[in-house]
């Protein structure tokens, strides 16, 4: 489009400047011949006409009745019928008249014209000087030709460039589709969309697509490993279960032995079930699939309930539990899960605090969060063990002698994470440990 | 007492039926929802034990249909799913009960008994007596052989619960639920500790204990 407009402008400029030039030549010729005629009559004019000139001009001298007295037509423009000039009405002085060419006639859209200016000489005869538009028509035609070629070239380049550009800009989309196809067909999650580092929208799309793939891959891997671990963790109690039954079956038939074995099996089953449930909770929370029952939680009441659960156990062990709770503190969460998490912390605290020790449970609002702290005067955790305590089934040196599955803290962390909260610990070996759970309040209260 | 059991797994159905029969209930078993619905509509039952996931018709729609056509039938639902369905929760609020598989049979039995008892609208006793032990619910006093026992509220609650179900095996889960209102088992055995304290306060010789431990299952209060 723009090239067409440029061409249009150039064409009209060129054509008008050519017209100006032609008209200038005609006017100066007219002046020259008129002065020759005035000074030396027709012979002087004829002589002047015959003399070589830079520009070819048509010259005609007519008598008062418009009868041609003399005319000279350059050889290259012979296709004009001069009779028309004789028959035409007398043109006014210094007016432009046009004589249509005869040869090509009406066939051409812009036939050659003879552009003529006339002047009445003092003796009453008419001097006409003209010029064919053929020359400038040729130039314009040439110009058009050149332009047509240029236009075709430009168009071709435009189309080719467009195809190339579209091709290039669609390549990321094709890459993306290809990666999707390969993942669907092979199930291999390793494929990634190449990033071209152009920083455009398609790059952004490819990047977020890769990020999505990363998330899915890590989720799948984590679920896979969780499944592997659960299968592995179930094998141990299953072995014990099987062993107990088998040994009883092979021993002397004795009611008491059988009873004992069956009771062992029952206990083992119970423990396996508890473990399976906890493992499922931890695995679900780790993969972000733990479903919470959101409700308004009355935290002080919940914490008092948990303390009530361990009241007698603590009393037996001569451990004092001190609570410092606000009168009112509500948050949105899953009360059953929070209770479970706090119970696990308190359970640990009682387990690892020697008789005569003290446990402090505090809760207070902290900006948009509540923090629940469980602090004991127990044996503490060694610094090298600290990072490992959250791992599934990790059991520290000190806990080997205690009843437990090594899932308590994993569950605490899982529940906290499911609530978009955090849990942290600080511990001094020999001084005690402190665990702090922070949960978002999310309530208008 | 007649119980309808709708359960598609044969082995599970067999052990439930056997256990309930031994506890003195008459049991009719249906292996799918359609047969179960037919039985429930044509025979009189005191309570039903129904698996939620059943072939042909699920347990929930079965019981909804029974209630529409015949009126109330107290139900214990069995489910292998850990998460409780909202519909079940609604039914729980209406007095029905829910158990997750696998469960302790003693727990199912205790729940069936409780359900039947509730439905029969038996008058609440004000005083419970087992052997030389008597518990006054109004004055909240426990007396053994003329001696008043000094019990803490949770110890009282546990004894009351065991005495109400004397002769029945009560699981730790059930004690947790009734005494503390908890539905998960903490790692430390808080129930053991409470039972131990209660035993000391009742103060019988070890061989004359009335609270017996059934290993792997729970506790039972029985006259020695």
Image (cartoon, rainbow, N blue to C red):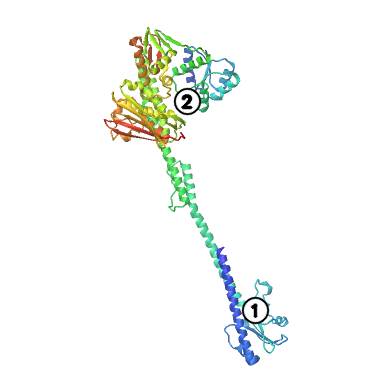
Q: Residues within 10 Å of mark 1 (few under 14, many from 20)?
A: many
In the displayed structure, would residue B184 be above or below residue A212?
Answer: above
For label 1, the residue is A115
With A32 as the anchor, is A276 left or right in this view? left
Q: Position of residue B23 (x, y in %)?
A: 47, 12
Residue located 43% across and 38% down the image: A220
Task: Identify the image quadrant of residue A217.
Answer: top left
Host chain of mark 2: B
Q: Tag on residue A22?
A: none
Task: Identify the image quadrant of residue A253.
Answer: top left
Residue B77 or residue A297, whichever sits in front: A297
Judging from the image, what secondary structure is the residue with disc 1 in? strand
Instruction: Have a look at marks 2 and 1 and say if they share a chain.
Output: no
Residue A123 or residue A370, whichever sits in front: A370
Q: Is residue A310 visible?
A: yes
Q: Is residue B167 visible?
A: no
Host chain of mark 1: A
With A60 as the anchor, is A397 left or right in this view? left
For label 2, the residue is B80
Nearest to viewer (mark 2 / mark 1): 1
Q: Residues within 10 Å of mark 2 (few under 14, many from 20)?
A: few
Q: Position of residue A72 (x, y in %)?
A: 65, 85
In three-dimensional space, the C-alpha distance between marks 2 and 1, rounded to whole angstroms, equals 106 Å
Whether pointer 2 and pointer 1 mark residues with C-beta atoms closer than 8 Å, the reply is no
Judging from the image, what secondary structure is the residue with disc 2 in? loop
In the displayed structure, would residue B126 be above or below residue A162?
Answer: above
Q: Position of residue B80 (x, y in %)?
A: 47, 25
The quadrant of the rendering that contains the C terminus of chain B is top left
């Amino acid at each position: 489009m723009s090239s067409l407009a440029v061409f249009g402008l150039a064409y009209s400029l060129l054509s008008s400047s050519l017209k100006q030039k032609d008209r200038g030549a005609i006017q100066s010729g007219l002046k020259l011949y008129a002065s020759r005629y005035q000074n030396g009559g027709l012979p002087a004019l004829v002589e002047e006409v015959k003399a070589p000139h830079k520009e070819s001009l048509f010259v005609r001298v007519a008598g008062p009745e418009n009868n041609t007295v003399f005319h000279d037509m350059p050889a290259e423009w012979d296709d004009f019928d001069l009779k028309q000039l004789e028959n035409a009405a007398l043109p006014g002085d210094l007016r432009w008249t046009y004589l249509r060419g005869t040869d090509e006639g009406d066939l051409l859209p812009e036939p050659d014209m003879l552009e003529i200016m006339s002047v009445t000489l003092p003796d009453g005869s008419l001097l006409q000087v003209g010029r064919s538009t053929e020359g400038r028509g040729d130039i314009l035609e040439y110009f058009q030709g050149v332009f047509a070629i240029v236009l075709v070239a430009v168009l071709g380049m435009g189309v080719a460039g467009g195809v190339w550009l579209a091709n290039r800009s669609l390549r990321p989309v094709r890459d993306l589709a290809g990666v999707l196809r390969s993942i669907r067909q092979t199930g291999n999650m390793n494929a990634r969309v190449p990033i071209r580092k152009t920083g455009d929208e398609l790059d952004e799309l490819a990047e977020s697509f890769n990020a999505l793939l990363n998330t899915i891959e890590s989720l799948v891997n984590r679920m896979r490993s969780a499944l592997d671990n659960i299968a592995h963790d179930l094998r141990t109690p299953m072995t014990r279960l099987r062993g107990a039954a088998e040994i009883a079956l092979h021993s002397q038939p004795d009611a008491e032995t059988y009873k004992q074995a069956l009771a062992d099996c029952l206990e083992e089953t119970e423990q396996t079930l508890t473990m399976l449930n906890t493992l499922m909770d931890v695995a679900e929370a780790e993969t972000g699939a733990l479903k919470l029952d959101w409700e308004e939680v009355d935290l002080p009441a919940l914490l008092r309930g948990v303390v009530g659960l361990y009241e007698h156990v603590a009393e037996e062990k001569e451990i004092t539990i001190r609570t410092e709770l606000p009168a009112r503190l509500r948050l949105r969460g899953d009360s059953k899960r929070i209770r479970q998490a706090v119970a696990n912390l308190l359970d640990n605290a009682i387990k690892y605090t020697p008789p005569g020790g003290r446990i402090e449970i505090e809760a207070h609002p902290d900006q948009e969060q509540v923090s629940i702290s469980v602090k004991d005067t127990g044996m503490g955790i060694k610094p090298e063990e600290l990072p490992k305590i959250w791992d599934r089934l990790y059991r520290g040196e000190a806990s080997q002698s205690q009843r437990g599955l090594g899932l308590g803290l994993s569950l605490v962390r899982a529940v906290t994470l499911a609530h978009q909260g955090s849990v942290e610990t600080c511990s001094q070996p020999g001084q005690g440990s402190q665990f702090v759970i922070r949960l978002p309040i999310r309530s208008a209260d | 007492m007649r119980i309808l059991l709708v359960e598609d797994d044969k082995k599970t159905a067999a052990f439930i039926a056997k256990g309930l029969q031994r506890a003195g209930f008459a049991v009719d078993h249906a292996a799918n929802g359609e047969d179960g619905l037919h039985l429930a509509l044509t025979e009189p039952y005191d309570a039903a034990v129904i698996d939620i996931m059943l072939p042909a018709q699920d347990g929930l729609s079965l019981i909804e249909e029974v209630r529409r056509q015949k009126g109330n039938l107290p139900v214990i639902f069995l489910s292998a799913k850990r998460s409780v369905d909202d519909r079940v929760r609604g039914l729980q609020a209406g007095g029905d009960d829910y158990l997750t598989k696998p469960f302790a049979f003693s727990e199912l039995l205790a729940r069936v008994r409780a359900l039947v008892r509730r439905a029969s609208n038996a008058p609440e006793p004000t005083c419970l007596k087992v052997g030389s032990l008597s518990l006054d619910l109004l004055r909240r006093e426990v007396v053994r052989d003329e001696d008043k026992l000094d019990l803490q509220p949770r110890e009282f609650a546990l004894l009351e619960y065991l005495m109400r179900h004397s002769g029945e095996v009560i699981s730790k889960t059930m004690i947790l639920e009734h005494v503390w209102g908890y539905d998960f088992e903490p790692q430390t055995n808080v129930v053991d500790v409470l039972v131990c304290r209660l035993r000391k306060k009742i103060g019988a010789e070890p061989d004359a204990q009335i609270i017996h431990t059934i290993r792997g299952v729970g506790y039972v209060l029985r006259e020695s």
